[in-house]
Image (spheres, rainbow, N blue to C red):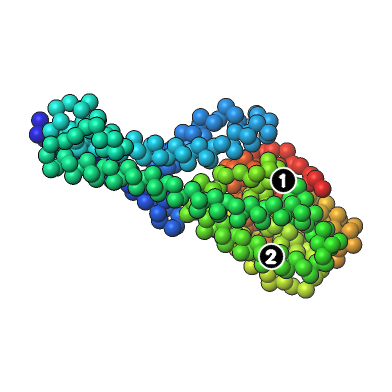
């Protein structure tokens, strides 16, 4: 009997330690630290949301369901953590002499939620009760402090996504962005755009790996997505670097590099496979030569200066696209991003769409 109680105490400590490790990784460590417990919670809830998010459902239904998925999953973490602490301390209270598991559970619940209806009469149990009460208060306080940080990062992300609609249409299109700059600002102003989005990608890399639930938080408007916005900007920068007959702009190349690094870091968190050193044509891309030619002709028809060597432009553009093609489509599918050309329109075999202007 003594051995059984000792094992129960050790097991209880282990359960509490695993829980606190999970809390530390999610709420305190400022870097990408995948946690198995959180992963299980999100996967279970993804399964429960499956009837409303299946590919056979209309996009409007899936979008409404996914709008609740991330907040519900995040809020579910607190009762999961509290329940594990409750179970762990129940084992420790029983090991210290409570005659039944029911009484140990009652003492653990009284301590965790600071209710005080189960007094104890010796120092070891009193210290155990104080420690559990402290953990319960800390868990609630940490989650409350965590939410403003997350929503601040969300708001900053969405400000840029909203502004992109003005410059690239809805859904965002690389060709539409270049055309609007050509008509309204002049193509030389694109350089400022690349600098802005290079900084945006750096923020995405930091926030969406240290606060991974942000990946699933959807835009306020159902036809917007941070993934689709990223794809449109990267494609536009790649077209500028490869196809437009303009002086070389290092900012476009830097924006592309910042973009595919950010998307890869997020993909790493979710364990998506990809080639870290891809090369075209050895590594294929999802955009076909015919689709590229259509954009090439469209831009030329608008009077935009285009490099005369179409084949070279295609090879250069594909050489840029191959760096982010796989991770862009994987994240579009993961987040159920709205249909957008050259990104979510081809994840999981969905039909291609044309940009709306």
Give the quarter of the figure containing the N terminus.
top left
Does residue 264 appear to the left or right of 6 in the view shown? Answer: right
Q: Residues within 10 Å of mark 1 (few under 14, many from 20)?
A: many
Question: Which of pointers 1 and 2 lies earlier in the amino acid sequence?
Answer: 2
The spot of residue 217 in percent (x, y) is 57, 44
Residue at coordinates 26% horizontally, 42% vertically from top-left?
132
Q: Position of residue 109 (x, y in %)?
A: 28, 33
Residue 317 visible (yes or no): no
Residue at the spot of label 1: 340
Q: Secondary structure at mark 1?
A: loop
Q: Mark 2 sits on what residue?
A: 194
Quadrant in the picture for residue 197: bottom right
**How far across and how far down the image is residue 230, in percent?**
65, 54
Query: Around disc 2, counting alpha carbons within 10 Å, would you say few (fewer than 14), some (14 to 19), or many (20 or more)?
Result: many
Q: Residue furthest left?
A: 2
Report the number of discs: 2
Residue placed most toward the observer, 144 or 351: 144
Residue displayed at 49% across by 48% down: 147
- What's the distance in space between the residues labelled 1 and 2, CA to CA? 20 Å
Q: Residue furthest bottom?
A: 247
């Amino acid at each position: 009997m003594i051995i059984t109680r000792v094992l129960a105490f050790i097991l209880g400590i282990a359960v509490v330690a695993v829980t606190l490790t999970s809390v530390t990784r999610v709420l305190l460590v400022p870097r990408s630290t995948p946690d198995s417990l959180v992963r299980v919670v999100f996967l279970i809830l993804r399964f429960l949301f499956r009837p409303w998010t299946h590919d056979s459902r209309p996009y409007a239904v899936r979008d409404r369901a996914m709008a609740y998925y991330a907040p519900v999953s995040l809020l579910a973490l607190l009762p999961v953590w509290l329940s594990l602490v409750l179970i762990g301390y129940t084992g420790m209270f029983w090991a210290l002499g409570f005659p039944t598991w029911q009484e140990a559970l009652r003492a653990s619940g009284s301590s965790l939620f600071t209710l005080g209806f189960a007094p104890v009469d010796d120092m070891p149990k009193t210290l155990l009760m104080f420690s559990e009460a402290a953990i319960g208060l800390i868990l609630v306080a940490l989650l409350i402090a965590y939410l403003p940080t997350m929503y601040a990062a969300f708001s900053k992300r969405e400000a840029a996504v909203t502004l992109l609609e003005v410059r690239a249409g809805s859904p965002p299109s690389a060709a539409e962005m270049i055309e609007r700059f050509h008509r309204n600002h002049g193509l030389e102003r694109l350089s400022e755009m690349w600098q802005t989005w290079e900084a945006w990608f750096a923020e995405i890399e930091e926030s969406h790996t240290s606060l991974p639930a942000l990946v699933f938080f959807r835009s306020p408007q159902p036809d917007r997505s941070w993934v689709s916005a990223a794809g449109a900007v990267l494609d536009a920068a790649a077209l500028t670097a490869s196809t437009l007959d303009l002086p070389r702009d290092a900012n476009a190349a830097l924006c592309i590099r910042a973009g595919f690094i950010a998307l890869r870091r997020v993909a790493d968190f979710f364990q998506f496979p990809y080639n870290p050193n891809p090369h075209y044509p050895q590594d294929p891309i999802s955009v076909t030569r015919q689709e590229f030619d259509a954009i090439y002709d469209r831009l030329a028809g608008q009077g935009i200066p285009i490099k005369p060597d179409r084949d070279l432009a295609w090879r250069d553009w594909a050489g840029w696209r191959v760096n982010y093609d796989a991770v862009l489509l994987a994240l579009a599918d993961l987040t159920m991003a709205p249909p957008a050309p050259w990104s979510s329109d081809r994840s999981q075999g969905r039909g291609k769409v044309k940009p709306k202007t």
